[in-house]
Amino acid sequence: MDTAESKRPFPIRMAERLAASRFFTFSALIHAVLIFLGGSVVLFKHYAEPADFAASGGGLVSNDTSVEAPPEPAPRVTQQTFQPPTPEITAPTPSAISTTNLSTPTFQVLQAVPLTPTGAMDDAMVNTMARGMAGGLPATMSARMGGASRAQAMAMNGGKKESDEAVLRGLRWLMKNQNKDGSWGPGAKGAMTGFALLSFLGHGETPASTEFGPTVQKALGWLTENGAKSEGRLSMQLVFNKPGVYEHAIATYALGEYYTMTRDERVVDLLKRAVGYIVDGQSPDGGWVYGYTKEGPGDTSVSGWQIQALKAAHLTGLNIPGVDEALDKAMLDLQRVQGPNGGFGYKRPQDRYSLTGVGVLCTYFWKQKKDKSVMDGIDFIMSQTDKNYPVEYQGEKADLYAWYYNTQACLMVGGAAWTKWNRLFQDEIVKAQAIDGSWPPMKSMTNGAYQTAPFGPGLLYRTNLCILMLEVYYRYMPSTK
């Protein structure tokens, strides 16, 4: 049925309806414009932005310029077959080793690293430190440099806040008790200064550090000045006496770590010469003895410090002649002295609690694998700790020397052995610390209690060993971690 409305022209009717719904129309136009603009932005980004991962960007995010520390250089171990221990020691040169001991290399002795005035660090040193850090540390040492890496290593390995606080108290005690010339101790200064440097370096402290920088720099000045005077013998004597082999190795160990952490080229010549004495002083059976005389079978206690020094030299990346070959031969000597129950002996196959940690740590340090000799040694350590050698600082059988090595050996192996050892030693060492930050005398009369150390004052020796034990959570990480 026609109506008056239907008879009106269509354009007029449409205009009137649009006018009546003008708010709806306006909204529709606005949405259409927004949709058009949004589509344009999407198309633009599609062509203008690269993907998050780009091969040329060097990381998961294209503008991420952070670089992880490179992995530890793989040891250049010659192919060899480790022979079982023999009852008689004939000290042959193993046929599996293709090299022989090298004569001490002739290196120019380093001019002493100049002392930096307390409270001031010259620009050259700061720049050297920066270059060293930028170069990256071996993966096994990277966690010691503080910040998130150290906190992560502490958490991963079961370290407590109280342990790092104890380390800081110990380092402040060392700083306070440093001799004016930069050394430590009334005697055996090469060893005591080397130990103190290892303690500071283990916490990531270098001459560029805010609190401990001047202390470390003064120590380096004393070590290099006197090392040059003694022609690279870091026992600070012109002839190696019996305890001098300990002193020399400990100080060389510290100098090697220092170079790896800082790339300070001024210590290279002295370090090379010091390492040369160790390489040249190795006995035919692969061990080391007092005075580097090469007479008689290797002494596991002496050898342990030489091996640690050589491993530090290896990590420098300087490719010092004879280092890797000497470490290969040292493994044969350690195998020679391993006892029937997994322990390690002094000069012959034995199961000695005080030396088993030496054998396990040094074997793992170089071979970087948990082979039967390592695992047998760990089993011996744990069983003897349960039965005969409780970890009690004031106990009758307390042995810091054994604990120093056992702590590192158990961390390297990890698993249940580390979980148990960490529970035994950590709180015990922390609570034993004196108020001033040192570690006091022990009731034990064992050699490892160090009332007076055989090559240095007992107070300094105990304090450094305890600091190094509590730094274990971040000082050296197993290659598998």
Image (tube, grey):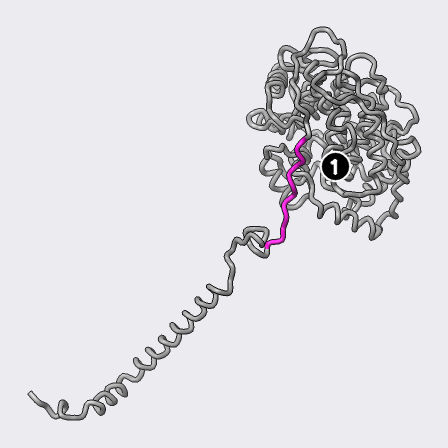
Quarter of the image where the N terminus is located: bottom left
User: Based on the displayed image, in which of its 4 quarters is residue 417 positioned?
Assistant: top right
Residue located beneath label 1 in the image: 316
Crowdedness near tag 1: few (<14), some (14–19) or many (≥20) residues, C-alpha within 10 Å: many
**x then y, percent, for residue 315:** 72, 35
User: How many tags in the picture?
Assistant: 1
* Front position in the image: 143 or 363: 363
Up the image or down, 145 lies above or below 479; here it is below
**x then y, percent, for residue 37:** 42, 73
Tag 1's secondary structure?
loop
Up the image or down, 365 lies above or below 22; here it is above
Residue reaching furthest to the top? 88
* Front position in the image: 136 or 436: 136
Report if residue 69 lies within the magenta region: yes
User: Based on the displayed image, in which of its 4 quarters is residue 342 positioned?
Assistant: top right
Residue reaching furthest to the left? 1
Q: Which residue corresponds to the image point at 93% horizontal and 33% vertical from the top-left? A: 229
User: Based on the displayed image, in which of its 4 quarters is residue 110 positioned?
Assistant: top right
**x then y, percent, for residue 87:** 70, 6
Main SS of the magenta segment? Answer: loop
- Say whether residue 313 is left or right of residue 476: right
* Front position in the image: 207 or 303: 303
Report if residue 169 lies within the magenta region: no
- Say whether residue 43 is left or right of residue 406: left
Quarter of the image where the C terminus is located: top right
**Residue 194 showing in the rendered view:** yes
- State which region is magenta: 64-75
**Residue 457 showing in the rendered view:** no
**x then y, percent, for residue 369:** 61, 26
Q: Amino acid at mark 1?
A: Thr
Up the image or down, 19 lies above or below 102; here it is below
